[in-house]
Image: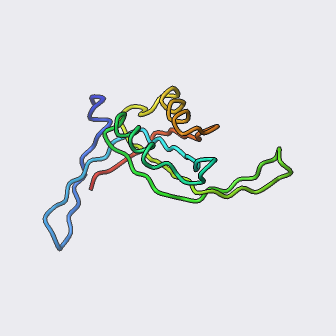
Amino acid sequence: MSREAEARSEVQIYTPYSEPVSFYTRTQYSQKLYIGSNNQTHKVDIDIITSFLNKKLEGYTYWLTTGYWIDRQDNNKVYVENSIIVEILADKPPLTESDIAELRTLLKQSAILTSLSKVDVALI
């Protein structure tokens, strides 16, 4: 079996209500970025984030969230802030460490949390 055939398989589903539905499954990379709000304005710099990502990526999804964490170096102070999670699906790892460092610099952030994993996706 070729690598392409292994990476993508076709499945057909039959229901009593419709014609057969075909969808493809394959393995892709899922990268998530967890980005906090601007330390001075306490707002998420969505325009800067989307402008940067639009230049680097074909597509992504984001949602606005609230982040919570405990700062162990500051008497266990609990922080709560507006934040954003960006998720990217791609055939290869979408953003490099240097891309994320560039975005971090543009946003004047001390850090951006990122995760990268392989996932099976299906377009139905």
Question: Residue shown at 27%/28% (left/top)?
Answer: 2
Q: Is residue 11 above or below residue 111?
A: below
**In the rendered image, which quarter contains the N terminus?**
top left
Front residue of this view, candidates 45 and 101: 45
Front residue of this view, candidates 56 and 23: 56
Farthest residue to the left: give it.
Answer: 19
Farthest residue to the right: give it.
Answer: 75
Residue 115 spot, x, y in % from top left: 54, 40
Question: Residue shown at 47%/29% (left/top)?
Answer: 99
Q: Is residue 32 above or below residue 4?
A: below
In the drawing, does residue 100 fall left or right of residue 54? right
Question: Residue shown at 26%/48% (left/top)?
Answer: 24
Front residue of this view, candidates 90 and 67: 67
Residue 26 spot, x, y in % from top left: 33, 42
Asked which quadrant contains residue 17, the reply is bottom left
Farthest residue to the bottom: give it.
Answer: 17
Residue 79 spot, x, y in % from top left: 71, 55
Residue 91 spot, x, y in % from top left: 35, 35
Q: How was this image coloured? A: rainbow
Q: Is residue 99 above or below residue 90?
A: above
In the drawing, does residue 69 fall left or right of residue 26? right
